[in-house]
Image: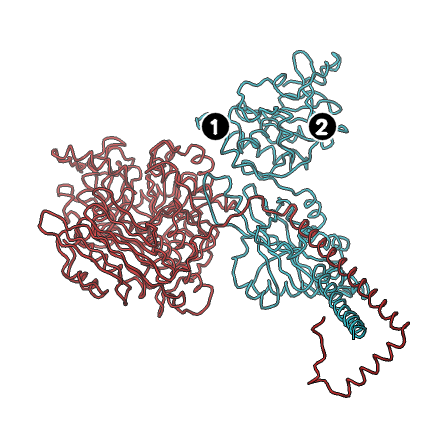
Chain colours: A red, B cyan
Amino acid sequence: MDEWKPNPAVKPHKKRSWYLAWKYKLMNQRALRKLCQTGAVLFLLVTVIVNIKLILDTRRAAYEEEEESAQDYDDEMLNVEVPRHPVNNKKVLDVEVYSSRSKVYVAVDGTTVLEDEAREQGRGIHVIVLNQATGHVMAKRVFDTYSPHEDEAMVLFLNMVARGRILIFTIKDEGSFHLKETAKNVLKSLGSQVAPFLSWRDMWTFVGKKGGEVYGEKHAKSPALSTWGDPVLLKTEVHLTSVEDAECHWPDTELNRRRKRFCSKVEGYGSVCSCKDPTPIEFNPDPLKDNKVFDVPVAVIAGNRPNYLYRMLRSLLSAQGVNPQMITVFIDGYYEEPMDVVELFGLSGIQHTPISIKNARVSQHYKASLTATFNLFPDAKFAVVLEEDLDISVDFFSFLSQSIHLLEEDESLYCISAWNDQGYEHTAEDPSLLYRVETMPGLGWVLRKSLYKDELEPKWPTPEKLWDWDMWMRMPEQRKGRECIIPDISRSYHFGIVGLNMNGYFHEAYFKKHKFNTVPNVQLKNVESLRKDNYETEIHRLLGEAEVLDHSRNPCEDSFVPDTEGRVYVMFIKMEQEADFTTWTQLAKCLHIWDLDVRGNHKGLWRLFRKKNHFLVVGVPASPYSSKKPSSVTPIFMEPPAKEEGAVAVPAVAAAEQT
Amino acid sequence: MQKINRNVVLALLSLTSLVFLLFQLCYYKFYLSQKNGAAFSKVRGSQSGQDSTRWHVVRKFLGLISNHNIPVYLIDPLILGLIDKDIEQIRSSPDGPSPECKYFCAPRDFTTFALLDKTWKHEVGLFRTAEKMGFQWLKIINKDPRLDGMDDLSGMEIPLHYIFKLASHAIHLVIFYERSGNFLWHGPLRLKQHMDRKFVPFRKLHFGRYPGAYEKPELLLVSIDDLKVQIPKNPSSFLEEMSHSRFLECRYREARAFFQLYPDDASLDAVEFRKKAKSLLHLAALTLNNLGVKFWLSSGTCLGWYRQCNVIPYSKDVDLGIFIRDYKADIIPAFQKAGLPLKHKFGKVEDSLELSFQGEDDVKLDIFFFYEEDDHIWNGGTQAKSGKKFKYLFPKFTLCWTEFVELKVHVPCETLQYVEANYGLEWKVPVKTWDWKSSPFNVQDNGVWPIDEWDNVIQIY
């Protein structure tokens, strides 16, 4: 208060005199002055009281409210939400990369992001992609460039990585044997000085930015053919850029927000993250007229193969009549990347803590997924079950929509499957044709809720039983003589090469040449004839019209079937009893179709196409259709080659491991 | 100079305090209005008899959701109560203009709407538009209970409630989910730590204190107060349903812990028994629901639900409880019609009534009737050969809904007390040899039936 002093320089003289006059006047009126003083004090007191009341009131109100809103409405569990990645404000990353014969590791800011010292594993070039703004690992790959074609895969991958990303390379054991010129040039274009001269058993580490600076490179030459180069350890610093620089500037829409979230986290998905011309993530395929499967939930069973899942979901969401709201992706394990893929497409995903190992783990995952599907969609009578390594045909839902009523009405049906085990390029022809088969093909199929809830779920193999769920479902105790409906031309395509029971050779031999329908809106033919009794009539009609082939010829040879089109032919093979598939297996083998176990049969009858003619194979005398055999015809018998006795056991094992 | 100073200081002080006081009053008023807008709208309302704020907010909200094709329906109990009074008139003239604002103008903090989850795609666009229209909104998400019962599945959290606030009025949107057992479920409203506890006075909300279970309602499009809105076709039965809609989730986590300790019986017999018990329970529920008789899971079936979320495979029967006041003479013929013959009938309506029906293959359905006293509830038992009577005492309880073997059924809300009364504190330990006359924790001898009544009170078929 003492500071308050009229400033003589500014204050007008006139006012000053008025003030003084007023003051002296007051001073002379002592009583009035006293009154004023008391008044002021009283006023002060009132202010203080109001003040205190205000404080108390506000406090109480706030407290009450806290109480009010808190009571009963508090989340009982402290919801500790750990962000998926800690926020990192650092501008410089310390990167350590180690390359040696038996061990590689990469550490970013002291955190090991890659460590591989397993024996006889992880040979080749390890590649890690870091986000240039956050330093997070976006992709981790290993390319065994000691083996052929792996360098092509690496080039493909490196081309998909967005410009500006930080790439870390390190070699474990050997990485140059099949590293061809193209790949070396790509590495050179990334700034590597050494890559063009990489040779046998050299050790090499490299850190660089795609389309930009090189942060470091180290190389150790192998002195001799029999020895490896000395281990190299590269320590370098990487300068982070701002987040804005690391992102594309797509228009701000909900879809692009999902895209942005995805693209800032993971790498290796190509054009979906392209700044200039990103590939769509919403497909809006034509709706189906009178879609009977619009409300049928779709369960996608997935593991940790995010690239597969990405391809699968793209094809699924492009299929006509798809209803994205009914799709749930079940991921076996707490993997982030598959979940990122699911979120990219705006679908819902559920993660499942792995139970048990190997086949039993898959089996438990299937059970949990199916149970969850029917819990989430309690109204559903069916569920479509898909796997992450399937392409889905454009008319997949149209196919199901036309046939699903059969599953509802015909008790003798076990499932509808989109997959024909015997439907290869050279054995399938008619997209509108359906079969009834005694085997359960899986690979995209429809399950009836009552079957699952009443029969399968209660006695599903427990975790300690190392059974395949599909093998278990094929067992007579479960199948109980029921059949599945399948199309002649499959509505799904199995593209998975990496898998629990899958490898490149196996895939090439049995899956690659599988026929896959690409025609939209196929009108299925005569669906009603697939009902139990109608189907028998249909088969008898077919057999009645079929021409009997010349049984003196070798059925394996192309000339066995005349060069016609659109005819129906029948052949008879030897099949002593219901389980005698000796001749069939040999025939399947020479026709290059599925021969690892018996698939696609209906009462000792197989239906396929040869040279665009419908080709029926009847097992005599086990099949009830044997009566159609003219008495003059001797059923063909084919003996398994004697020397392959030992080999027969192998397919049996492989068969048990299929899918 | 000192004197001058004193005066000046005093005058100055008065002036500042005056300014301060004014400021405080303003602040006080502002604070109050923010805290409780209704306090002021009430004043306004009492002057004009209406509160147009609410009507405007509701209208804006309905516009918003109809723009996005989201089929919400009104479940506000206070408005439905008003509507119910003139339901006939509203039904007969669905499009008639309202002479006055009768329903949406009563001053309230909230108006409550419901939305069926599956009828909506959770588009973010809605919230964008809402914000543009001036709404503030709050989303309450939580775990999906439909996955809770599953071993180790973790899905995305699902939205349970939304609150849209505009000016002094808020719209509470309750999301309903379909559950196995053909009913609708809404979740509890629980605030997470970072949430704004003062967004709205949460305590006054009509939905959210507990989760609730409802039948799927039939809807009716009506026009009230010049607003077109969907309401449950029968508001009074909806309100009645609401009054006892509290839902209890099964204790899945504890059940898992139980199975860790005592692994589940996966033998074929157990599977078969569970299947039969389930279909018997479904049949019994259908029969009793058709008669309108309220029942709950009792004894072993209740213990199975509470302890392991499943039928106890060695329990050999299904046990239900019914209050004797809900007894109907039609019960026995209805069950017989459903294919469940009466096996025995003990006691009489006035005392210790107990019915037992024969299900498929030795699975028995026992129905115990419960008698309410001032401070406890009891049911009776009768030993056929001796005519001895037993009494089982329970503390008083209310009924809650739950989901059990794909069925919406009642259980005592105070399940722990109920189970402990029946099985003692050791209820967590499985007991396979059970004697209904001596094993229960709460059994009491209750004399003997007089011999001349035996024909009536002990009937065995």
* Residue at left offset 76%, top offset 54%: B82
The answer to whether residue A655 is left or right of residue B171 is left
Give the vertical position of B110 relative to B249 (above or below): below
Which of disc 2 and disc 1 is earlier in sequence?
A: 1
The answer to whether residue B76 is left or right of residue A336 is right
Q: Position of residue A328 (x, y in %)?
A: 44, 50
Q: Chain of mark 2?
A: B
- Label 2 neighbour load within 10 Å: few <14, some 14-19, many 20+: some
Residue A523 is at least partly visible in this image: no
Q: Position of residue A53 (x, y in %)?
A: 77, 57
Query: Where is the C terminus of chain B found, in terms of image quarters?
Result: top right
Q: Secondary structure at mark 2?
A: strand
Nearest the eye: A593 or B387: B387
Query: Where is the N terminus of chain B found, in terms of image quarters?
Result: bottom right
Q: Position of residue A481 (x, y in %)?
A: 36, 34
User: Residue extending furthest front?
Assistant: B1
Q: Residue A37 occupies which quadrant of the picture?
A: bottom right
Q: Secondary structure at mark 1?
A: helix
Q: Position of residue B417 (x, y in %)?
A: 65, 30
Give the vertical position of A462 relative to B458 (above or below): below
Q: How many marks?
A: 2
Q: Give the residue at mark 1.
A: B261
Amino acid type at circle 1 is Leu
Q: Chain of mark 1?
A: B
- Label 1 neighbour load within 10 Å: few <14, some 14-19, many 20+: few
Nearest the eye: A229 or A600: A229
Q: Give the residue at mark 2.
A: B377
Amino acid type at circle 2 is Ile
